[in-house]
Amino acid sequence: MDNQYIDEYLEQDIINIQLNDENSEYIGIRIDKCLSEILNDYSRAYIQKLLDEGNITVNSKVVKSNYKLRAEDSINISIPEPEELEIIPEDIPLDIVYEDDDILIVNKPKGMVVHPAPGHSSGTLVNAIMYHCKDSLSTINGVLRPGIVHRIDMDTTGLLMICKNDVAHRIMSDKFKVHDITRVYTAICYNHFAEPEGTVDKSIARHKVDRKKMAIDPNGRRAVTHYKVVEELSNNFSLIECRLETGRTHQIRVHMASINHPLLGDEVYGPKNKPFKTEGQVLHAGILGFEHPITGEYMEFKAQLPEYFKKVLDKLRK
């Protein structure tokens, strides 16, 4: 989940969504289902709570959660002042790749949210590391994101760094800002490539209509992804490796979709049909390299592909 995205919503009194040709796929869909997809930082239960409390209107009228949207509907969502979330340490198993007094490297599983947000106050990586690290976590990102210096999407697996003190956090945060970090992802995408490798250098910003999405936007922040083909697979799929030069929200997913190679399983930027039951995009953060914030030693960690990824690969290789 993208923290900037969450803050963007919490800072607004009213969110307006207008149904038109660009989001016509939501016409005829229940409003609670539509909004839980568009406002994907909030759970469907939280959306239903807003509906029940009259904080969501359609054409200025309060509606129930089973209301089916129509063309030209104007939806207004009033987000209440955020309640203080009490983050409880939870004994959730962690796949720890490395740990010392300053940093912790974990291999995040698919489906785990990185930090708490409305509708996701438990079961997150933060709940788990608070239990594991006790009081040894940086405080720079506040009570909801202790130790979190970077994020990956809920349905993306792979390596994440947690900082255990403020000194390490500041140093690593600066390294991420100047792109002084090695981050390599493995993915399966649609279609074979004409060239074995390439670079996508396209700026990214929040989508102007569909607020759950990022989009290519010349006025956005510069984003650069270097990719190479690892293997051509059956059914016109490709196994690729992506090296991030920058780290924008949904960067690989947006960039690959922009060149007609959306990631397999990505229902936001790719086809709606799901040839495999992947529960989101087939994307794995497999390599993380950096200079240690205290010792200055270069360290590089690798995480093997998760089982679900291997199973999809096996099917496509046959």
Image (cartoon, rainbow, N blue to C red):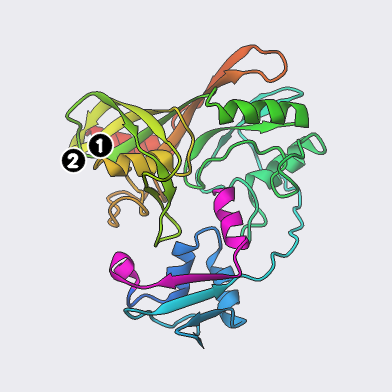
20, above or below 271, in the image: below
Q: Label 1 belongs to which residue?
A: 316
Instruction: Give yes or no for residue 17 being in the magenta stretch.
Output: yes
- Count residues near mark 2 (Cα–Cα under 10 Å), then give few for <14, some for 14-19, many for 20+: few
Q: Label 2 belongs to which residue?
A: 235
Q: Secondary structure at mark 2?
A: helix
163, above or below 203, in the image: above
Compute the Cα span from label 2 to label 1. Answer: 7 Å
169 sits left or right of 175 in the view: right
Q: Percent from the top left, x then y, of residue 57?
A: 51, 82
Dots 2, 1 in contact, CB < 8 A: yes
190 sits left or right of 131 in the view: left
Foreground pick, 108 / 262 = 262
263, above or below 26, in the image: above
Residue flagged by tag 2: what amino acid is it? Asn
Q: Quadrant of residue 307?
A: top left
Q: Secondary structure at mark 1?
A: helix
Pick the quarter of the image with the C terminus. top left
5, above or below 19, in the image: above
Name, please, the residue furthest toward the bottom: 61
Q: Can see residue 282?
A: no
Write down the region rendered in magenta. Answer: 1-26
Say which label, 2 or 1, has the lower sequence index. Answer: 2
Rendered residue at 62%/61% (across/down) = 11
Q: Quadrant of residue 135?
A: top right
Rendered residue at 62%/57% (across/down) = 120
Name, please, the residue furthest toward the right: 135
Q: Percent from the top left, x then y, of residue 72?
A: 34, 79
Q: Percent from the top left, x then y, of residue 100?
A: 73, 22
